[in-house]
Image (spheres, grey):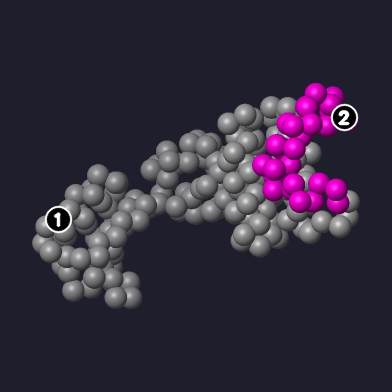
Amino acid sequence: SKVKGGLESEAELQGLLASCDLTKKAASKAKTLSGGQKRKLQLACMFVGDSTVCLIDECTSGLDPLSRRIIWEILLDQREKRSIVFTTHSLDEVDVLADHIVILSKGQVKCQGPVAELKTRFGNGYSVLVPNTARLDTPYPCEIHQDRLVYMVPDSVAAAKLASQFAAAGTPDVTITGPQVEDV
């Protein structure tokens, strides 16, 4: 805090330590921390000094799933107060954390925009999954995947209508899945 101006009160610093899940390690030296704890310390150092724009590169790579989720929670909590720009190869991380994404390939921008918009524009539509025994005459293509029929529909409205048709026909266990960032 002092390196960045030292404007926080002791209570604010303790709050930042708590939000970064480091309260129990406040008196520890950085070299004694685990990998996940070091990442949390890096985040706390970035947030201190009331930084309004934060840049993060691969913040959860190499971490176990529990540590990744904790880092995600910290970032979700802090994004109300700051603009956070991060790079990642983890597409599930993008789905959880990003409001706006830019997809690069070989140094070129391939697409950019809000996550939901990109999923709609470049995703593979929606899938309606039903038991293999349930069949309806629909205009949508259908594939068999394991013990399920998978109907591919263009959008969420068509998916909801088809799911309603199956429900009205007495079909149990209807599932709808939407496009993923990986599809984009």
* Vertical side of 8 occupied by 63: above or below: below
Total marks in image: 2
* Left/right of residue 32 with respect to residue 129 in the rendered view: right
Residue 165 is marked as 1
Q: Is residue 105 visible?
A: no
Picture residue at 64% right of the left edge, 30% below the top: 82
Q: Amino acid at mark 1?
A: Gln
Q: Is disc 1 placed on a helix, strand or loop?
A: helix
In the picture, residue 65 is in which quadrant?
bottom right
Q: Amino acid at mark 2?
A: Lys
Along the line of sight, the residue nearer the viewer: 17 or 158: 17
Instruction: Point out the frontmost of discs 2 and 1.
Output: 2
| Range shown magenta | 1-28
Along the line of sight, the residue nearer the viewer: 73 or 60: 73
Residue 104, position as x, y percentages in the image: 60, 44
Picture residue at 69% right of the left edge, 48% below the top: 21
Residue 41, position as x, y percentages in the image: 77, 46
Of labels 2 and 1, earlier in sequence is 2
In the picture, residue 166 is in which quadrant?
bottom left
Which residue lies under the disc numbered 2? Answer: 2
Q: What's the distance in space between the residues labelled 2 and 1, CA to CA?
A: 63 Å
Q: Are marks 2 and 1 in contact (CB under 8 Å)?
A: no
> Are there few (<14), some (14-19), or many (20+) residues within 10 Å of tag 2?
few
Residue 57, position as x, y percentages in the image: 71, 45
The N terminus is located in which quarter?
top right
Q: Is residue 85 visible?
A: yes
* Left/right of residue 30 with respect to residue 42 in the rendered view: right
* Left/right of residue 126 with respect to residue 130 in the rendered view: right
Picture residue at 48% right of the left edge, 41% below the top: 115
